[in-house]
Image (cartoon, rainbow, N blue to C red):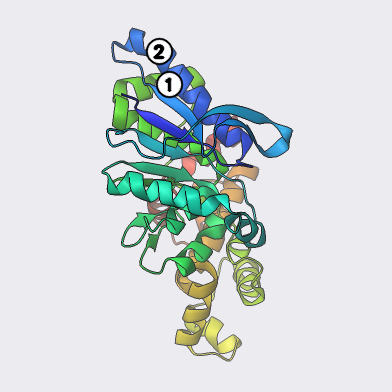
Amino acid sequence: MRDFTVLVLEGAYASSVALTQDMLATAASLAARARVPAPRWRVCSLDGGSVALQGGLSIETTRLPVRSRDDRSTWVLPGLGMGTPTLLARRLAREDLPRAAAALQRHARGGGAVAASCSSVFVLQAAGLLEGRRATTTWWLAPLLQQKEPACRVDADRMVCADGPVTTAGAALAQTDLMLHLLRQRCGAVLADAVCRALLIDGRQAQAPFIVPELLASGDDLVARLAARVEKALPAAPSVAALADELCMSERSLSRHVHRATGKSTQALVQSVRLRRARALLEGSRMTVDQVAAAVGYQDATALRRLMKKVAGANPSRYRRVVAA
């Protein structure tokens, strides 16, 4: 019985496919030393044979069985690497997507687990597997996922979300984080930790440190203006009420607009701007943590540490070490 079925779709992101293969191969090579069974997997596509990936690369696959009642493997979709809503819409409109969605739906209904990263999470959505669940995806596509699946709690801050048999991960290289999570789940923490050490992987819990508010809004002019206004005003960030007054809007209308564009509240948008500025100062200056906190509008370093730990999953010192290195 296999632990994983890697389902490769036409035009998948080559790095995401390679990461999946390399991490499984590394786990298999380390299993004996860790005294645990080696993971078993297969690489499949809808029709089998050679599958073209992005960047002119390709991979050989076996045909995905139409039905396999005893299949208890976790189906893994490497990322599609669709960087914009327009490109994603074109990819989702291709004729192979309904077949892939139907296969995923059958597997899940039969009790199987599924996992995807990046824009492949939208394939799970098309299969109806995200309704009522918590999920993540590439952070700048998160608002689109929320629009497509209102009954899903889309958490763009998280790198990996596991909800029952469905596991999702963020931007393309979060496939690394996804595979570590799945290896830990299927093969145990000892083997997953050995893979981390062998590949020098520092497990990440959040996408939040990498989010750029303007990009999260997918070109929304009002959100871009808000982000610029807040950053220019630091350390005295304006209140939500003041921002609404400047735009001649009610706080409720502003909140609806920001949430529709970013999936976040207006206050969360302000925090994102402050955190981004704090990280830039930590990485690119010799300011102390207390000075950085003051520069972005916090009374002391404790408040900044608390917020960075909550939102970004890391203390300010983590970014300061980047400078020291």
Q: Which mark is residue 69?
A: none
Residue at 53% from the left image edge and 85% from the top image edge: 244
Q: Amino acid at mark 1?
A: Val
Q: Amino acid at mark 2?
A: Leu
Residue at 35% from the left image edge and 56% from the top image edge: 134
Residue 62 percent coordinates (x, y): 51, 28
Q: Which residue, as the protein is rendered here, is positioned at the far top?
A: 33
Q: Is residue 321 left or right of residue 39?
A: right
Along the line of sight, the residue nearer the viewer: 143 or 204: 143
Q: Is residue 22 above or below residue 83?
A: above
Q: Is residue 308 above or below residue 221?
A: above
Residue at 61% from the left image edge and 42% from the top image edge: 10
Q: Is residue 2 visible?
A: yes
Q: Is residue 214 left or right of residue 56?
A: left
Q: Which residue, as the protein is rendered here, is positioned at the far front?
A: 66
Q: Is residue 253 above or below residue 286?
A: below
Residue 228 percent coordinates (x, y): 65, 69
> How would you rate the neighbour count of disc 2 (Cα within 10 Å): few for under 14, some for 14-19, many for 20 or more?
some
Residue contact between numbered discs 2 and 1, judged by CB atoms under 8 Å: yes
Q: Is residue 235 above or below residue 102?
A: below
Image quadrant containing the N terminus: top left
Q: How many marks?
A: 2
Q: Which residue is mark 2?
A: 30
Along the line of sight, the residue nearer the viewer: 154 or 306: 154
Q: Which residue is mark 1?
A: 195
Q: Is residue 291 visible?
A: no
Residue at 60% from the left image edge and 87% from the top image edge: 247
Along the line of sight, the residue nearer the viewer: 88 or 280: 88
Q: Earlier in the sequence, mark 2 or mark 1?
A: 2
Secondary element type, mark 2: helix
Alpha carbon distance from label 2 to label 1? 7 Å
